[in-house]
Amino acid sequence: MTVQVKTTIQSLNLAVVPGEEKYVARVLRHEIDPCAVQDIVAIAEKIGVTPGFKKVIDYFKVAQNETPAGFEVKLEIAPDKVLRADLVRNISYDKNGVLRPTNVLFSADSANPYEVAPIKGLLANLTCNPGIIYDLFINNPEANVGNKFKTRDEVMAEIGNILGPGCDISVELNDPFGASDAEILEEAAKFKEMLSEYRVVIKVPHTGPVNKDNVGELLTGDKRFSRNCRTVSTADALRGHNLALMLHEHGYRVNFTLMFEPYQTALALQAKPYFINSFIRHRLIQTQKMETLLRRYRQESDRSHLVELRKLMIGADYFTKNEDNVDLLSVKDLAEQLVAYRMYNESEGSDGLDGVRHNLRVMRQCNLDDTRLIICSMEGEANYPDIDKLLASDEFVDMAGRVVITAEPNYLAQFTSTNQVISYQRRFYERCQWYELGLILPRRTHCENCYRM
């Protein structure tokens, strides 16, 4: 018979460093490895906390004898023979240094405080950008009830208050192209002051061929871009990478975003990001449309399908506005290459998750233990269930702790419900109604278990 012995810091019976009693009381119930007890008591004479521990507690002001969510309790024996507790940022942890229920974490794409509030207890991260804040909330009278919120700062401050200490908040740079490094650091510092150094994550985009001189093309006229996505200068394409490295050097965690193809992964990791991303929705939809048109062309040899394919690929920025007469066979060749690369006609990519699989395999080999993958841009009935299956598979079960699934709150919410939820609720309340009337409900032996609730 194996006996599971739980050992806590309190069981060490160490004297507390004078003046640190209220801080130490917050970790006395923290469990430690029983095998480490003998080594600890052989060296440590007292117990205390680090300056960082005090700073976290003093900032978040959580309930007495608790540590805030979003922090891992770590112990170290200092040269003065004091066992000191530290609080290290780790969104895998709930309050009091207890791991969250699952290794997979959840995030929300929203800047609507009313929408965030019902899901706040389930989130480890929130991502938002100016478009989400202004278009979907501030300037949307149905969402911004009574026009209560008028500025980005007001919205971010409210969301920070709702989410509490355990949730990271990824905020996007206003201008990653024209702003100087100094201006970007000033913007980041403003968000750090608002949300705290512990929660703020700066979103930095891949920049491709876009730069400060041509970004205006995306905002004026027909908003079409004149440069092909594959025609990049080294400086332009690596602008985002270098911004991420610069912010990392200044102590910021970076959410390196706009990742659509697997080949972006390894170079993105060189920028030492805290988050990388797999965008899956639009990429899968485009692949499905390309394969449909290619198949029709193969079956019918009708060039009108290639004309439609060219229109599709120009609209999706594979070709520029100046390439509306690009050779149809060139269009066909590129589309075939993309469909093949994405392995759409194979089990690896038929669900649109070939990029996710690739990202996880590369991350398994990388030397950035804190980097996580955000799986984002989902819709439809299959995306989330397919991701759920993938992360439960034998190949990727070890990587589940490196994944954050993010979507609009209502998209995630639909996967808490099934048809049987309604059926069972109907039976339950039918039973309750009969009892309230003092009647005996006819026995339904075939579903008796329905009533054992």
Image (cartoon, grey):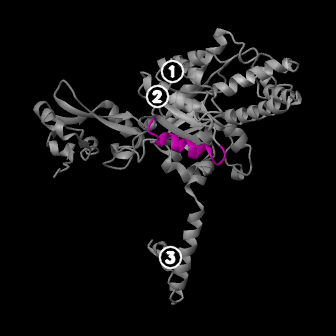
Residue 446 bears which disc, if any? 3
| Mark positioned earlier in the residue sequence (1 or 3) | 1
Cα separation, mark 1 vs mark 3, equals 56 Å
Q: Hey, which residue is sitting farthest left in the picture? A: 42
* x and y percentages locating residue 140 in the rendered image: 74, 46
Residue 269 bears which disc, if any? 1
Q: Characterize the local packing of mark 1: few (<14), some (14-19) or many (20 or more) Cα atoms within 10 angstroms.
A: many
Residue at the spot x=14%, y=43% of the render?
13
Q: Characterize the local packing of mark 2: few (<14), some (14-19) or many (20 or more) Cα atoms within 10 angstroms.
A: many
- Residue 361 horizontal side relative to residue 418, left or right: left
Q: Hey, which residue is sitting farthest top in the picture? A: 234
Looking at numbered disc 1 in the image, what kind of residue is underneath it? Answer: Leu
Looking at numbered disc 2 in the image, what kind of residue is underneath it? Answer: Thr
* x and y percentages locating residue 245 in the rendered image: 52, 17
The residue closer to the viewer here, 294 or 411, is: 294
Q: In which quarter of the image is the C terminus?
A: bottom left
- On whether residue 383 falls in the magenta region, the answer is yes
CB atoms of marks 1 and 2 within 8 Å: yes
Choose top left, top right, bottom left or bottom right for residue 18. Answer: top left
Residue at the spot x=51%, y=21% of the render?
269
Residue 53 bears which disc, if any? none
- Residue 62 horizontal side relative to residue 181, left or right: left
Q: Is any part of residue 391 visible from this angle? A: yes
Disc 1 element = helix
Q: Is any part of residue 160 visible from this angle? A: no
- On whether residue 420 falls in the magenta region, the answer is no
Q: Which numbered disc, 2 or 3, marks the residue closer to the eye?
A: 3
Cα separation, mark 1 vs mark 2, equals 9 Å
